[in-house]
Amino acid sequence: MIFLGAVGMGGYAQLITVLLVFVAVLGITAATTRWIANYQKQQGAGGNIQVIETARISGNKYVQIVRVGETYKVIAVCKDSVTLLGEVPSEQLHLDPAGRNPSFKELLDKAVGKRTGAAEESREHDEQ
């Protein structure tokens, strides 16, 4: 009976150890991913080319608005080719005034707000 208790305690210790190793590996992976993302962002920063907006047409076909210097070009991006469709005057574009993409937290808050808003509307409709 005492022997079984000692084996059980070893099993718990092994489980805790495995969980700690898993959390450590997960943390190292997250830190490495963040570092690589920041490194790549710095490599592309300050360039003369910036993708402003992308719209998916089909599985592997996209239309993009790209800023090249001070001009805005519209291109079609396919699996094996890129085609210039034309140029768009900057006055016709609806650009974010801050010139930045929203953070993941902002997008998540917006999505959660829509879900809770839809749920409240549904409850109000059911009450009527």
Image (cartoon, helix red, strand yellow):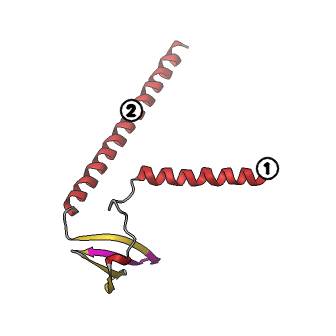
Q: Which residues are magenta?
A: 56-67
Left or right position of 82 against 7: left
Which quadrant is home to the N terminus? Answer: top right
**Residue matched to label 1:** 127
Determine crowd level at label 1: few under 14, some 14-19, many 20+ residues with C-alpha closer than 10 A. Answer: few
Q: Is 62 or 126 nearer to us in this picture? A: 126
Q: Is 112 or 32 nearer to us in this picture? A: 112
Q: How many marks on residues?
A: 2
Q: Quadrant of residue 26?
A: top left
Left or right position of 2 against 82: right
SS under mark 2: helix
The type of residue carrying mark 1 is: Glu
Q: CA distance from mark 1 to mark 2?
A: 49 Å
Q: Position of residue 119 (x, y in %)?
A: 66, 51
**Residue matched to label 2:** 20
Q: Residue at 34% across / 40% down in the picture?
A: 27
Label annotation for residue 55 = none
Identify the mark nearer the N-term, 1 or 2: 2
Q: Is residue 49 above or below residue 113?
A: below
Q: Position of residue 105 (x, y in %)?
A: 43, 49
